[in-house]
Amino acid sequence: MGIIRPVTPTRAQEVYALAGALWTCITGRWPLDYAAAGIDVQNLSPVQLRSRVANRRAPLDTETPWPELQEILRPVLLSKSKDRPTAGELASLMAALWPAPATGPSTSPRNCTMLRRHLAYLTDRCLVGAGEPQIHGTQYVGGPDGTSLRLHPVAEPEGLDARRVEMGLESSAEYDRRMRAALP
């Protein structure tokens, strides 16, 4: 039996996953409407499902509790890999929405704060994965010895705490203390 190794996604795949995860946070459902495309996900293996989705583009779910954000995510989820924005470009598009008030049942102040936190972590994860500086200072990396911990580089570090507050996160100093306290 061969060794199963994790897949290393491309940058376009990570941005797609980020957009899909954000859509799911907003609606509570994955963005693709498999039923509308005639795809029975219950009876397909993951490989079969990927093949069907790739060969028959499934439409997006029609629920739009946060249309402003979903209009930003829609082209990412429907475009070809080569036409997708980078994680940094997507984050810049979404940044224009903050701190705009959201409306609808899925965007109560509590859910909105939770979505903002998820957005910060997911955006930083995609940026770090793409080798770019992160925006919200949520991603740490280990040193070569595997024990030291350091913050991955941050774009415009002088504005880091203001961006963290905007996303409902604690200060960078408090987060750093918590991260280091979690080390063995």
Image: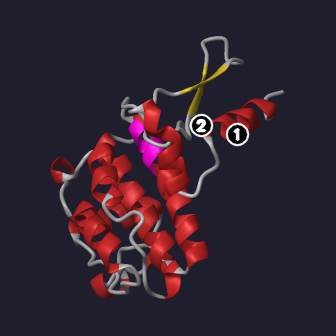
Instruction: Check residue 158 for magenta coloring.
Output: no
Residue for point 15% across, 52% down: 83
Q: Is residue 26 above or below residue 119?
A: below
Q: Is residue 43 left or right of residue 72?
A: right
Q: Amino acid at mark 2?
A: Met
Q: Which residue is mark 2?
A: 1
For the N terminus, give its image quadrant. Answer: top right
Picture quadrant where residue 67 is located: bottom left
Over which residues does the magenta segment extend? 123-127
Q: CA distance from mark 1 to mark 2?
A: 46 Å
Element marked by disc 1: helix
Colouring scheme, one of rainbow, by chain, secondary structure, one colour:
secondary structure
Q: Residue furthest left?
A: 83
Which is more foreground, mark 1 or mark 2?
A: 1
Q: Is residue 156 above or below residue 15?
A: above
**Can the viewer see residue 138 in this picture?**
yes
Q: Which mark is residue 174?
A: 1
Q: Is residue 83 above or below residue 41?
A: above
Residue 48, position in %: x, y? 38, 64
Element marked by disc 2: loop
Residue 79, position in %: x, y? 19, 61
Q: Main secondary structure of the magenta part?
A: helix
Q: Amino acid at mark 1?
A: Glu
For the C terminus, give its image quadrant. Answer: top right
Q: Residues within 10 Å of mark 1 (few under 14, many from 20)?
A: few
Q: Is residue 116 left or right of residue 170?
A: left
